[in-house]
Image (cartoon, rainbow, N blue to C red):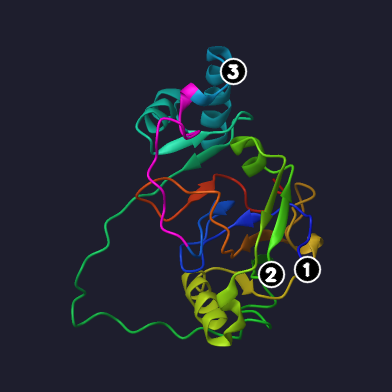
Amino acid sequence: MNRAVPRRLLGAVAMTGAGALALAGAAPAAATDDDPAGLVDLRSVEAAAHSLEVAAGRAGLPVDVVRELVESGRAVVGDGGTLSYTDRFDAPDDHPAGTAPVADVPGDPAGGSKPDAPLTIYLDFDGATLRNTEWNRFYGQDVYELAPVAAAADAGYVYQVWARVAEDYAPFDVNVTTTDPGADALHKTSADDGEYGMTAVVTDTTDIEPAGESSGRAWVGGFGNAF
């Protein structure tokens, strides 16, 4: 059953990020003039300037740098000043024969990679309902219904998705799990709350598209935030 709680989105085999958005079952759509991907889509010149200043302050970047990122299509800024950076890269066609083998991943999907870690990434394959999140505000939709990913019926698929993310976070004190740890383990409720994380919804829903030529987006500073 879909749960109406704030969620972040993540593609099945894409990189994980705080508040990241990508899709399991679709190629990214090319950006167009109608996409909410730049300053022209903010409500006014004054609102745009304020949002840029807030985003720059939160990211620790000069306003001119954030403006250039937005105008070049490499970032977007939400109305509330939340920065979303698009990391584009070209994957090589060939890999050298001496490529190191995949690292061993501890644990298992349900039990988690590091169950005693204070930080958690919860991979949710069951679908979700998004309300009152930065995704809703940015795309101007009050509600988004995210379908479960059909491939999750295959335990091997779930393991591969979990293992890829767990491997990426293996050097850090982060638990990657497919078991819902509850809101207390995901949301940072105070400055001294040292146990928090994020939810990554793996979905076949394709009506929220990431930027063209990219695997997804991430809201900077979203880890531990209900968004």
Q: Secondary structure at mark 1?
A: loop
Residue matched to label 1 = 1
Most prominent secondary structure in the magenta stretch?
loop
Frontmost residue, 139 versus 191: 139
Based on the displayed image, in which of its 4 quarters is residue 125 positioned? Answer: bottom right
Q: Secondary structure at mark 2?
A: loop
Q: Which residues are magenta?
A: 26-40
Residue matched to label 2 = 126
Disc number for residue 47: 3
How far across and how far down the image is residue 81, in percent? 59, 30
- The amino acid type of the residue labelled 3 equals Ala
**Mark 2 touches mark 1? (CB < 8 Å):** yes
| In magenta segment, residue 191 | no
Specify the farthest residue to the top.
46
- Rendered view: 1 above or below 80: below
Measure the C-alpha gap from mark 3 to mark 1. Answer: 38 Å
